[in-house]
Image (tube, rainbow, N blue to C red):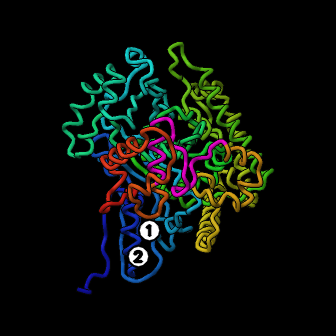
Amino acid sequence: TGKVRRFGLITTNSLKQTFNRRVVQAALDKGLSLAFAVPDHPWVDSADGAAVRIAMTVGVPGSGEGRLLSVTAEREGKSEGLEVDLQEQVGLLHADLRIGANVAAAKALKANSGISSPGFKLHGAGFIVTAAEAARLEPDAPIKPYRNGRDLTDRPRGVQVIDLFGLTAEEVRVRYPGTFQWILERVKPERDQNARSGYRLNWWIFGEPRVDLRSMLTGLPRYTATVETAKHRTFQFLDAEIAPDNMLVCLASADALHLGVLSSSAHVVWALAAGGRLGMGNDPRYNKSRCFEPFPFPTATAEQAARIRDLAEQLDAHRKRQQEAHATLTLTLTLTLTGMYNVLEKLRSGEPLNAKEKAIHEQGLVSVLKTLHDELDAAVLDAYGWSDLTTALANPPQKDAASETLLVRLVGLNTERAAEEARGQVRWLRPEYQHPAAVASQSPLAIDDPAVKQAALATAVPASPRARQAWPAALPEQVAAVANALAAAGAPLSDAELAACFTGKGAWKKRLSQIVDTLEALGRVRRQGARLASAG
């Protein structure tokens, strides 16, 4: 009616996350501005009431600066709830409820596309087996080591998972009758109650088997993983045989250059600003579409890339070595990543360590861990050409201001890269997989470095859906190849056109038809009349 001058909202603090952020941005684009915001505030006392954190915002017509109040400390109040200390800033408030670098406006880059995915979503606890239970099933049954978020940050459970993707129920029953009975009794009853028909009909397969992820990982000896929601943002290599849980974000790269950049302060500062927070611990959340896909990697020289790779390999090996060295006789790790990084945080802040933390410091050689991170941070900043920030980012009194400067530069670099891509220049992270035709013209970041050339050869996958490729021998590779062909086609294919993508002997065309039917049932392929298209 034109009479409202301002309005206020109290929401959960998920207002800053990707989906809700789009709603806020749409309103800002239509002439609204934020006059006031508290992005993250406790909602009563989580010990007595709802374990929720809220955001408070005030919107006004027009453009202008707003007040941002950030919680800097929380403590028990004299009455109900918590008392908080607030820090105020004044400036233009962005859709992510920040003042300063507009990280929320960063664009997803083609260079980072198609190589990140959440892990498998089981929809059936019966898929998970212990080592003893797996030993009672067929020795050649498709059972893999399985890791979830807690396995990486805390103590691994040592469990495995039955992965029957690519097999029909009849094939499972004939080849692996013991395994078939196991999931028939422990998975099917749960799936029969599921509202989604695809989950009910394909009850022996993971609810979300991640066809794209399987394609991404084909040929890789290892991949990079991080826990979606965790107190500390860490990345590590996992062996290719390990099946990742849905709460892991998987990056399909075996290159330690990428692990090093992601593990550096340059990326961690970005991820904390770009991602939201979740859970009772209000822990940072790593959303691949906001934290990874828009992130601009540095264009490193061969020497810089070699240095980053070396430090990243050392970092990954150091943490795993120290954890293995302090495992109990039952192989349950007593030294956790969370514990090591809690102590690392205290070392950086100069706080004294208590007795438990001193023990963790000795077991984890956390001062060595700190040295590795400091050297890695310096190497990555050097690759960006931003060595002027190295000292300030490592100095607590200067860190906030330096982090803001870093974010401004990263947002600016994202804008430059997006403009390059609009002109047709894409700095692919895995060109041999993402865009095989680009391998011949890839920038020096990847192609002039012999180590990356070797990695590219080791991880090469089928190139174009129109180029005839040999029909793979193993079923999982067959499924990945078909999904890949449809995804890369750019337009729906007829059955004949899809078959023309492959060459082979025997009854492979019959198998092709069965694989297409399976992918369609899983929602990964859709029919458009007589043609087939990837469902994304």
Q: Give the magenta-colored segment's residue range.
A: 458-485
> Label for residue 242?
none
Q: Is residue 238 left or right of residue 70?
A: right
How far across and down, in percent of the image, does residue 100 sit?
Answer: 55, 68
The residue wearing badge 2 is 28
Please rate how many residues cluster around mark 1, counting C-alpha atoms within 10 Å: few if below 14, some from 14 to 19, many from 20: many
> Is there CB contact under 8 Å for labels 2 and 1?
yes
How far across and down, in percent of the image, does residue 495 sit?
Answer: 38, 55
Q: Quadrant of residue 353?
A: top right
Q: Tell me which residue sits at (69%, 51%) in the image.
A: 395
Placement of 358 over or under 87, stated as above or below:
above
Asked whether 78 falls inside the magenta stretch, the response is no
Q: Secondary structure at mark 1?
A: loop
For badge 1, the amino acid type reads Ala
Q: Secondary structure at mark 2?
A: helix
For badge 2, the amino acid type reads Leu
Q: Is residue 82 left or right of residue 341?
A: left
